[in-house]
């Protein structure tokens, strides 16, 4: 039964999240393959004749079953939300934006004049990095390089060093705006707080999509903050965003998208626990993109 469950979970994850698995950080795909191979081995051993079981063998067998069930449940929980339209279409290069993708990041680069201010954006938990291509593409169309990391297991806390790597890989960017959605914004706040005093390529702005810091950075963070939230968000609720004002700098700007929900900050379909939208996704995305471009442009002046 455990072996069958492992095979079924791997099959379900591939059928329902194939795009995110193929285009995501390779770690999850590797773990799925390992789960499939281990399940096949367990199934094979189950049908083989075996000697009588001693007490310690029974105990070990029970322990392995419990661990296996927990592992299979973890693999199911980690299945990412796949990007959908118009984010998938926004991944195509054209005359205004060049889109490059590798195993660990997505880069949107303007084809014209490129600003020395860049944007580094952390996806939300378990969300396909491509899901933010449409909402962030207007930044690239306005002249700003946008980097979206592919987080290991799609968990932002496992990608906390990715900003340092990007800063080294893009020496032409001398000013950075870091941001993120949901858990990604929480990690972006940590990165901004640590990077605002960098003498070479400082963080000059923090962008929060339906997010807030984990700790009080009201006095330590020296850069402007834009927090964009949604009235119908069932996860980063209006009450949580209101409470975050106490742990962000007093000069922070708070913008609210009326009728929007948590999942409207990307394009990856409905999210469990979210609220009910009262505005179209296209309208919400347009407002988020507009406010984001205005914020970054002001910091570049």
Image (tube, helix red, strand yellow):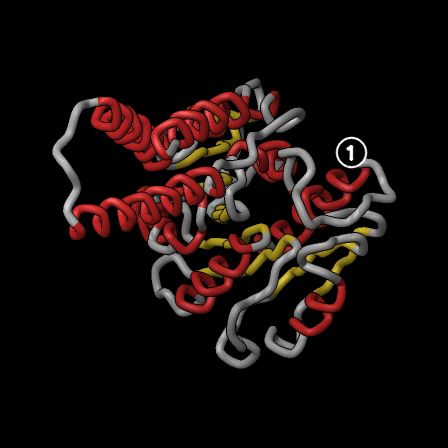
- Against 301, residue 285 (above or below) is above
The quarter of the image holding the N terminus is: top left
The quarter of the image holding the C terminus is: bottom right
Tell me the residue at 38%/43% (across/down): 69
Tell me the residue at 69%/67% (across/down): 240
Element at label 1 = helix
Residue 33 location (% of width, % of height): 31, 27
In the image, 23 versus 300, the foreground residue is 23
Instruction: List the single residue furthest toward the right.
Output: 278
The quarter of the picture where residue 201 lies is bottom left
Instruction: List the single residue furthest toward the left.
Output: 51
Q: Is residue 147 visible?
A: no
Q: Is residue 259 visible?
A: yes
Would you say 127 lies left or right of 85 here? Answer: left
Report which residue position mark 1 lands on. Answer: 282
In the image, 56 versus 115, the foreground residue is 56
Residue 72 location (% of width, % of height): 40, 39
- Against 152, residue 269 (above or below) is above
Q: Residues within 10 Å of mark 1 (few under 14, many from 20)?
A: few
Tell me the residue at 66%/42% (across/down): 271
Residue 162 location (% of width, % of height): 36, 49
Tell me the residue at 14%/47% (across/down): 54
Would you say 54 lies left or right of 257 here? Answer: left
């Amino acid at each position: 039964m455990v072996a069958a469950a492992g095979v079924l979970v791997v099959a379900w994850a591939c059928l329902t999240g194939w795009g995110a698995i193929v285009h995501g950080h390779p770690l999850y795909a590797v773990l799925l393959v390992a789960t499939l191979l281990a399940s096949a081995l367990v199934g094979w051993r189950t049908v083989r004749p075996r000697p009588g079981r001693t007490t310690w063998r029974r105990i070990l067998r029970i322990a392995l079953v419990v661990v296996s069930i927990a592992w299979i449940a973890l693999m199911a929980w980690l299945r990412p939300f796949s990007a959908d339209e118009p984010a998938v279409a926004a991944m195509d290069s054209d005359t205004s934006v060049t889109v490059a993708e590798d195993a660990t990041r997505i880069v949107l680069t303007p084809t014209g004049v490129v600003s020395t201010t860049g944007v580094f954006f952390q996806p939300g938990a378990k969300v396909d990095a491509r899901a933010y291509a449409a909402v962030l593409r207007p930044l690239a169309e306005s002249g700003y390089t946008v980097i979206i990391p592919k987080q290991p297991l799609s968990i932002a806390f496992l990608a906390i060093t990715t900003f340092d790597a990007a800063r080294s890989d893009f020496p032409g960017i001398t000013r950075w705006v870091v941001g993120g959605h949901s858990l990604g914004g929480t990690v972006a706040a940590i990165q901004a707080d640590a990077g605002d005093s960098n003498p070479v390529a400082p963080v000059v702005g923090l962008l929060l999509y339906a997010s807030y810091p984990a700790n009080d950075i009201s006095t330590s963070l020296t850069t402007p903050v834009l927090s964009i939230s949604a009235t119908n968000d069932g996860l980063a609720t209006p009450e949580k965003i209101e409470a975050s004002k106490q742990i962000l700098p007093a000069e922070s700007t708070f913008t609210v998208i009326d009728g929007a929900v948590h999942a409207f900050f990307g394009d990856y379909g409905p999210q469990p626990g979210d609220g009910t939208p009262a505005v179209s996704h296209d309208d919400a995305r347009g407002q988020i993109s507009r406010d984001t471009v205005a914020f970054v442009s002001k910091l570049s002046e």
